[in-house]
Amino acid sequence: MPATLATLDAKFPGAFATSAFRDNTRVEVAADKAPAVLFDLLKCLKDDRGFDFLADIAGIDYLNYPNATDRYGVVYALTNLATGERLFVKAFANDPDPALPSAVPLWAGADWMEREVYDMFGVVFDGHPDLRRILMPAEFTAHPLRKDYPLRGLGERHNFPTITRAES
Amino acid sequence: MPVEALPRLDDAAAGQEFLYTLNFGPQHPATHTTLRLILTLDGETVVKAVPDIGYLHSGFEKLGEDLDFNQYVTIVDRMNYISPFANEVSWHHTVEKLLGIEVTPRCKYIRTILAELARINDHLLCVGAAALDLGALTAFLYAFNEKEKIYNVFEAASGQRFHPSYSRVGGLMNDITDAVVDLIRDFVKTFPKALADLTRLLNRNRIFVDRTTGIGHLSKADAINTSCSGPVARASGVARDLRKDEPYLAYPDLQSTFKVVCSTDGDCYARYLVRMEEMAEALNIIKAAVENIPAGPVNVALNDKVTIPDKTATYRSIEGLIQHFELFMWNRQWDPPADEVYGATEAANGELGFYVVSDGGPRAFRARTRPPSFIHFAVFPRMIEGHQISDVPAVLGSLNIIAAELDR
């Protein structure tokens, strides 16, 4: 792990911060640097450091989180299958147009994971081949896992268009 | 009347594609659960498959931000409802990692045994249903016969057959009784025969073998690139198993009792064989673990202030009463560090992970699930393209897509 962080430091000086909690090591890319740096950083980790397995992409909305400075966080859980090491790359994005570069060119598995983050949080992944909603219906307008979306919804269910038997 | 030559059919058809679209699901007996495939067919060959999911989306992750660490266990139960205890183990593994708790040795063993039983249950359903879709009804009935015995174990341990909700932060709802141990011992004794029956019914079954060999091929490079895990990845030659690579619970003690089952073929038959062998390995783990369950308490000590005290302690001691109160009042409860952690375990379908973000309060600020079904279903189009439409149930059956976990 120190070797990986040293490689990143040499290639992307000042572009990221590191933190650790329990057995998780995190590389955090700030919102202003992420659009330019994130893709190259993930590519470097994949090609140079052997993090060939993208375990997960998790979206987080940090609205009202204590001491948070950025609104959205997207966490890439990377695994090095040869050594079993895990590394978590966290990139931030902000309103009004939260956007990050897509990781689909690196991992095909990122396709649906990014679609889910887009669906649930509205973070746009530039360069994604098919960025559509995946779990919510296409005509849905909100992003339900955002913290400003209420638990019981905004009344979508009650206003859902219904067809009568005569119209069908 | 002068005869005019009609334009030749070939010319008229030159610019036309004779492809047609077939909706497979969301209500189709071979999908088993609520998922829809939009198939573009050329005759009977699948040219393109576009999965359309979300029919069963019920906002589990949103609920995870509203329910506390113990309440949410009832929801994770309903993700992969064929192996619910494996989900509970994974969820509380992550929560305990966040809180920094080490559960007691007895709890570790019980969780391990029940999680392995859940794995066998899941694999039995997958194998049985895959065979059923290809016309082999008998294997399905044999598999369900064994599933009943596993449900009996869960019922004896937790009082609930299908959704046990048995795990708690720092321990279990209650300790197991000797009756549960006897049921598990019985199962260990009788299951090898049932597994041998299943093997004889399917392994060399001409129709089953012909319909699964070479179908839905996934290469090792593709399996890694598309984030596959569990039996799907292992059938393609990725030798990764979190029980070996990141041992948790009682697995560090049980390393010598099981092997990681892999294949290099990467087709539906390989995935079937891997699941069958994994059941045998899981049984070895149970066999070793059930005879070595350590004595002692099943919950972490009362003064750690994380686990629900048993009823005797609640009613008869002031410490127990206080702790019960502390853990059930919505403004008190746990006191986790304001940080975030990813924890993963090897569930029946693959790496089941949770990314829990805490703001210091008793409920998760964000409870992200890494659902193996979701990731495996994304690979489905590249597995099926070029195969026949009758291969769709074979490939779906080999992936073991559980829609409740897929859509959450």
Image: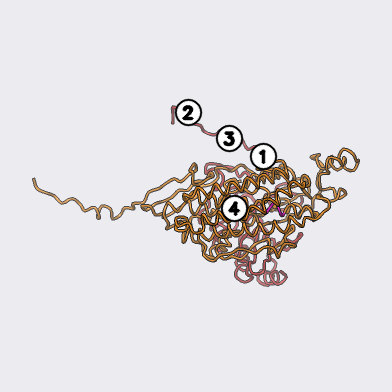
Residue furthest to the left in view is B1
Where on the picture, by quarter, is residue A160?
top right
Do discs 4 and 1 share a chain?
Answer: no
Three-letter residue code for mark 2: Thr
The numbered dot on residue A157 is 3
Q: Secondary structure at mark 1?
A: loop
Front residue of this view, candidates A95 and B243:
B243
Badge 4 density bin: few <14, some 14–19, many ≥20, Cα 10 Å = some
Between disc 4 and disc 3, the foreground one is: 4
- Inter-mark Cα distance, 1 to 2: 29 Å
Q: Chain of mark 4?
A: B
Three-letter residue code for mark 4: Ala
Q: Chain of mark 1?
A: A
Front residue of this view, candidates B47 and A91:
B47
Residue located beneath label 1 in the image: A151
Magenta run includes residue B114: yes
Q: Secondary structure at mark 2?
A: loop
Residue B255 on image: x %, y %: 71, 64
Chain A drawing hue: red
Q: Chain of mark 3?
A: A
Chain appearing in orange on the rendered image: B
Residue B14 in the figure: left or right of residue A81: left
Residue B81 on image: x %, y %: 62, 46
Do discs 4 and 3 share a chain?
Answer: no
Secondary structure predominantly adopted by residues drawn in magenta:
helix
The numbered dot on residue B194 is 4
Placement of B364 over or under A107, stated as above or below? above
**Residue range (magenta):** B112-116
Placement of A111 over or under A15, stated as above or below? above
Three-letter residue code for mark 1: Leu
Residue located beneath label 2 in the image: A164
